[in-house]
Amino acid sequence: MQLNQLARLLVTLPVLTAPFAGVQAAELDRSILPIAEPARPTFSELDVRNAKPPAQFRIEAPAGAPNVLVVLIDDLGFGATSTFGGPIATPTLDDLAQDGLRYNNFHTTAVCSPTRAALKSGRNHHMVNMGLITEMATAFPGNTGQIPNATAPVAEMLRLNGYSTAAFGKWHETPAAETGVSGPFNRWPTQQGFDKFYGFLGGETNHWAPALYDGTTPIEAPEDPNYHFLTDMTDQAVAWMKYQKALTPNKPFFVYFAPGAVHAPHHVPKEWIAKWKGKFDQGWDKIREESLARQIKLGVVPAGTQLPPKPAAIKDWDKLSADEKRLFSFQAEVFAAFVDYTDHEIGRMLQATADIGQADNTLVYYIVGDNGTSAEGGEFGMSNEYTAFNGAAESLPDLIKKMESWGGPDSYPHMAAGWAVAFDSPFGWTKQVASDFGGTRNGLVVSWPKGIKAKGEVRSQFSHVIDVAPTILEAAGLPEPKVVNGTPQIPMQGTSMVYSFDDAKAAERHTTQYFEIVGNRAIYHEGWFARTIHREPWAAGPTRPLAEDVWELFDVRNDFSLSTDLAAKQPEKLKQMQALFMAEAEKNHVLPIDDRGFERFVPEIAGRPDLMAGRTSLTLGEGMTRMGENVFINVKNKSKTITAELEIPEGGANGTLIAQGGRFGGWSLYLKDGVPGYAYNYLGLQQTALQASKPLPAGKAILRYEFAYDGGGPGKGGQGTLYVNDQKVAEGRIERTQPTVFSGDETADVGVDLATPVVEGIGSGQRSAFTGTIEKVTVQVH
């Protein structure tokens, strides 16, 4: 074909392609997803020039469907942000509230994985098998941690209806045994409705050195002293939104933006911390009082609301020592800086929607916490959160010494529990306490300039995280599907909140809701709330047996903060509420209630699948990395043998042979200056190293480390011995070992030590890479 003929043909293309307009969106049956393709026509014409092309099948979202942006902050309670009367300035959230609505009666589940699974599915967390975090799943329905196919997430519904979908940040919904390279991947983000995922799989991450995935592919953060994951994930989200709209401007997007902030570790650049110096010197009792006054003035808390008493374990501020006040004030400064920094990064992302002309038609849910502020820092807080998980409390003098590094790469910190109560004002309890609004009532701002006429108003209808998904569907003009990917669906249990968008006085439609986490349980029904505090968030076990729990009763129509117990005055009402809880609990797979704590971290005790069940040996090759503790053989509380078969080049070799964990706890077998060694890092508090006296010569070598565990319970010590070609080259005693966990996001790696280093002198990343050849490494436990 001549070029001039082609040019003439191109001119006619708009006419030729007119019949390809596609099946109209209104004609599509969206009740079964994926939407069924139409039958393919057949043709009798010989020559294509004589045939009329059929309409092309193309799935598009309903006309005018909004973009959807769900922001979910981690571990931030009702009374922290300025938008809801708290002491921490959140200008992005403030501005969004001025253009939208503040919901002051919105609830979560009290813990992260359950809230996230309920949010995306529109069903109660036990209905999607997420009774607690994935690492504490059990064999009972409601608690397996395995999201059923019958409860498809709203992201999948949107994707199959013509949306682009992306998730950034924290996930924490994949069963622990499914987080390795073998999968299965059907409960990873990219098979839970998201075209794009950039973030981490577990409950928390080191923001300076995160364990990241792009889809299902592990990636390493840059070795940049200024790197911080929060900025990185924001950059990724902004770039994705801009790219998506550049290529498909008429295709709406759904973005789930879930920072690891402000969950511990509280990692934040120093310049942000400096802004908050001295702002919390008045202490947590005054902060509670000041916050309540602001909340009443703002109208997010009713006049006359009283502060309930603090838990007995939280000391009065004026009874603390000078050192305690100095340490605790600084902890709050770091936490406030983290909140401030997070709100700033969310502002950058929201600005991107304006930059691409999408702000007016973007439905934004800015959820201020997946539960209340965390009190898991205990009495003094921690410079390394994993000390608490391993039953090794840090002393006040030790914590004072570590203030200089608090919030930086050399820390993994959490603040004292008193601040959690203050930042959950005007309530009395915190994260984990599903039976108190301090654990479940979170601030919410909703903005949608094109779809919500009201601005700067407060909405007080009872709502719950399961209401978000049905709201999104209604706003997008989409039906709730009856079948998704071949599986009939359990109907959503949430109630769309669209009815409240332009009517502050509309009667609430979500009238009954149960709550339960590790035995802390409650029931809301038509303005009444019955509850029992079964377990304190800092306690190792429950207060009393489940059958002996003491229940309380509140009329929340007149008691916003749960300050006045009416159980003695209205015993019949309390009995009715208790019976309703049991009915809801049975219906939603809450029963039997499991109030165990640390035991549930052990798969054999909890009864969940264990990738290494029954195995006593694991043989690995060079380059096998990113093995989290749930997909690696458990070496804790037992004897072990690690054997590395090596090829040493001329001139010697250096680097990591195998390591597990990192700066805040772990172990490593390595060569330094060619000399073999083994190091045990006990929670960053104590390093024990066994070192040979001379380097390995060139050629083949077998390096073996044996550890004889003392026994007699968890966390004991033992004797370590290092051998080269069956010759003893070093030995020594390791006094203490970590009984429970090395890290939530650090991994076991062969040939390199990723993220943070177990041994500072070896380093991490490429600096720690082994320069010889590893033929294989075998880890055996006895």
Image: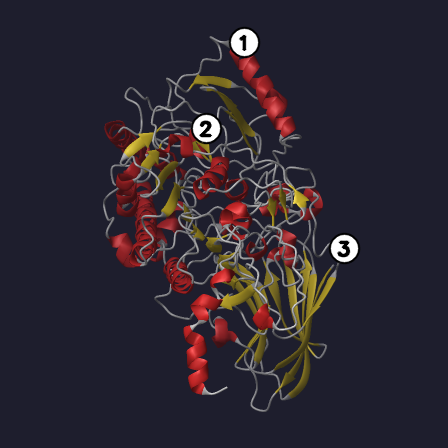
Residue topped by disc 2: 436
Among the 4 quarters of the image, the one containing residue 666: bottom right
Q: Which mark is residue 572?
A: 1
Is residue 636 among the parts visible in the rendering? no
Check the image and name the residue furthest to the bottom: 650
Q: Nearer the viewer, residue 590 or 249?
A: 249
Q: Residue type at mark 3? A: Gly
How many residues crowd mark 1 within 10 Å: few (<14), some (14–19), many (20+)? few
Identify which residue, 482 or 653, lies in the foreground: 482
Residue type beneath disc 1: Glu
Q: Say which label, 3 or 1, has the lower sequence index.
A: 1
- The nearer-to-camera label among 3 and 1 is 1
The span from disc 3 to disc 1 (Cα, nearest Å) is: 52 Å
Query: Considering only vertical position in the picture, is 752 above or below 445?
Result: below
How far across and down, in percent of the image, does residue 368 sit?
38, 41
**What percent of the width, then of the height, locates residue 102?**
33, 35
Q: Residues within 10 Å of mark 2 (few under 14, many from 20)?
A: many
